[in-house]
Amino acid sequence: MKSVKIWLKGARIYTLPIGLVPVVMAFAVSFRMMRFSYFEEPIMHLEQCFIQFFLCCMVAAFMQIAVNYANDYCDGLNGLDENRSLRALSSNNSKPLCDVSWRLANAGISPKSVLKAVIISAFISCIFGLIIVLRTGIYWFILLGIACFAAAWFYAGGKHPYGYKGWGEVSAFVFFGPVPFIGSLCAITYGIGIPETSIFINGGQRILACLLISCIPGAYSACLMMVNNLRDIKSDKEHGKITAMVRIGERNGRRLCAAMSIVSAVLLIAYSILIIVLPSAVPSIWRFYSVEVFLSFSAIVCNTSWHLFFAAFQWLLLLVIAIKAYKFTKCVLIGDYKNAFPMCVAQAILGALAVLLSAII
């Protein structure tokens, strides 16, 4: 059990929600696409939707674990973790699995073992990814997977890691935002048994709205990396790791991080207003069939009471997110990165739940 706890701690499982958030949001959007389309066998398609969602979650989870192990391995080899305090695994830490100042070397794990963990995690992610490819017939997903693994490894690995040149935050935004969101949306859309001839490209406004929604998880992921890099800004300078926070300075970095959190909250609120005013106007790149049903605000109000209940619960979550965003902003601006870190993860989780509720509102 101690060995399992060590590897769970090293995998930094508290970051897993960041990888799962875009998948959950894509599932919610896909579910709404099904609700406002015509299906001959809706139950069958619903089951396939959940299967695709599960497969996408597995890809995202094991990819995230592989990324965390790879960063532990590469940063350790480059001496970027030497300044971290050694903490015993059995210490009286209230959050033993959320200790950001801990690494696998502290438990005596060799670099080769960590590298093996990277390979195993990446291999499991590949297996689930290949299942998605076979179920959807979208073979360009293989190239997308290769690009994701390359981005994960060369962030801190190789002779010229781009994470040490100021591009880490950008990569976190792209590969934990638009890429997994749109990729999962595509995997679910084309993997639930609907003929390709019945899937159509949406209008420009809905595509733009879809891209904006995909920025929400990307922003939270970038915020998480910003908090991490702001915390280590001094040691990164000493070791030659030029992050975006090092480039723009700690003061501007704090402002940028806080701004992205606020923008994410605003986008979530805008999305929630949209699904109330125009319930069938699903922000997505694709839509099913050529016939659509447009419901008005009055139609959703006249719907069953349980819809209103979930809508009220969603807005309660949005209120909590707004409060968290405010507290997160305060923590970041005063340099309280220890408390800002879990607040960022909490915002991402609550945001995913708020979007997930939209699937049944």
Image (spheres, rainbow, N blue to C red):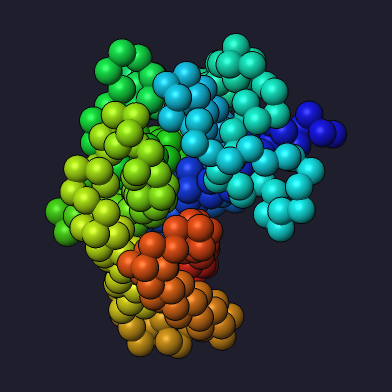
Residue nearer the viewer, 204 or 343 = 343
Q: Is residue 18 visible?
A: yes
- Residue that lies at the very extreme toward the right in this rendered image: 1
Does residue 206 lie above or below 358 as drawn? above
Residue 351 horizontal/vertical position (percent): 45, 63
**Residue drawn at (31%, 13%) of the image:** 159
Tell me the quarter of the picture where residue 147 sits.
Answer: top left
Name the spot of residue 117 as percent of width and height, x first.
61, 20
Quadrant assignment for the N terminus: top right
In the rendered picture of this protein, how many numbered marks are placed on residues? 0
State the image coordinates of residue 157 (x, y, percent, origin top left).
Answer: 38, 19
- Res. 264 visible in picture: no
Q: Seen in the image, is 1 located left or right of residue 231?
A: right
Name the residue located 38 percent from the left edge and 72 percent from the top edge.
Answer: 330
Looking at the image, residue 116 sits to the left or right of residue 165; the answer is right
Quadrant position of residue 327: bottom left
Q: Is residue 349 left or right of residue 333?
A: right
- Expressed as whole percent of the image width and height from the top left, the position of residue 78 reads 42, 21
Residue drawn 71% across and 53% down? 93
Q: Nearer the viewer, residue 63 or 275?
A: 63
* Residue depicted at 48% across the width and 48% down the height: 18
In the rendered image, the vertical position of residue 149 relative to residue 277, given as above or below: above
